[in-house]
Amino acid sequence: MKQKRFILPESEIPTQWYNIQADMVNKPQPMLNPGTKEPIKAEDLYPLFAEECANQEVNQTDRWIDIPAEVREKYAYYRCTPLVRAYGLEEALGTPAHIYFKNESVNPLGSHKLNSAIPQAYYCKQQGVTNVTTETGAGQWGAALSYAAKLYGLDCAVYQVKISYEQKPYRRSIMQVFDALVTPSPSMSTRAGKDILTADPNHQGSLGTAISEAVELAMSTPNCKYLLGSVLNHVCLHQTVIGLEAEKQMAMAGEYPDIVIACFGGGSNFSGIAYPFLRHKLSGEKKNTRFIAAEPASCPKLTHGKFMYDFGDESGYTPLIPMFSLGHDFRPANIHAGGLRYHGAGAIVSQLLKDGLIEATDIRQLDSFAAGTLFAQAEGIIPAPESCHAIAAAINEANKCKETGEEKVILFNLSGHGLVDMTAYDQYISGTMANTGE
């Protein structure tokens, strides 16, 4: 049997995160104060975020940011994660392409989100914070933060998008196991939630509504900070452990990717696997790697959105972010990939797309589940609905190789497993799932 898994020893866990902003010729435009339209400084973010996270957010000069020793020790619970050659999928497709995936589903919480939850909770604890709050869509980020908060003795409140709260009850249960207070959003517990429900009593929620409620709670609760699971620069920074490990593992396999793919909601797992490889192109090395963000066709901010300054939430509580956006009041369809139901893209990814350094594709819901089911049958791993989008994009590229006979190397990020998403698979298998909102 051929060797499929490439695993690094614990000693190879990265000691630094990679800050792509330092290498970008065209830096991301700054966030703006919505009242004054002046650029946001780190200290302007201190009331909302942990101070170190705020400093990382605006850092455009330091290429490498040290990972605290205690965070690295926590990473060692589950890192380094395996890189896997998908021989089964290659055979099922009959493609000459070499397909690899970075398996982020093997950590205790089942997704890549823990990579940022741990350092954010650590920085809050170091600062003396006692309470944290956040939003979550599918529940992967909420589960990761609930666990990280418990590790550091922090009280955690999570606003979960209402449709996901109803679709994914076991993710809610996971958060509650770690003593998190979980509230479906929009709710009547905040002014933002009340206003949204007054305007539309049947509102099923979005990440934008949940962010509004979490930000409001953080700003009105003593010694409380807001922690975010995607979009912002410091979150994407923390996720670069994925790509930094994958670089070494691809070297173990004796190959280098021609194509790097990840699903896309706000940008965290795409950034995590893409930025470390992209740095070689930014530094002038002769690398022709393509970077593809795979988003849902029902929430296509990269493929059909406009670049603008927009709020990160529905109620307009956040700074204005330079992003490709569908509008902060956009209401995404009730697809099962709850983590991808976000109206905008992070500032760094948006700038990279403007500069033509990355590309995007949109995937229909039924196509994503067809790809995820084929992957499960070929590789024995049931992927999260979000990850199914990356798999679908990888299959599309592998099929192009089959047509041309090219032996390209494709790497994608398996951002999480779908073992608590089986209701969605039930709908797909029974034929009751639709391409909603496309």
Image (cartoon, rainbow, N blue to C red):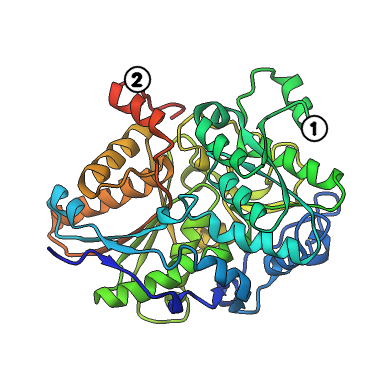
Amino acid at the residue labelled 2: Thr
Identify which residue, 420 or 88, lies in the foreground. 420
**Residue 207, how many percent across, how many down?**
62, 39
Q: Which residue is mark 1?
A: 190
Q: Residues within 10 Å of mark 1 (few under 14, many from 20)?
A: some
> Going 25% across and 47% down the picture, which residue do you hit?
380
Q: Is residue 328 visible?
A: no
In the image, residue 85 above or below residue 139: below
Q: CA distance from mark 2 to mark 1?
A: 35 Å
> Going 60% across and 25% down the picture, which residue do you hit?
204
Q: Earlier in the sequence, mark 2 or mark 1?
A: 1
Q: Residues within 10 Å of mark 2 (few under 14, many from 20)?
A: few
> Going 65% across and 78% down the picture, which residue do you hit?
61
Amino acid at the residue labelled 1: Thr
Q: Which residue is mark 2?
A: 432
In the image, residue 41 above or below residue 94: below
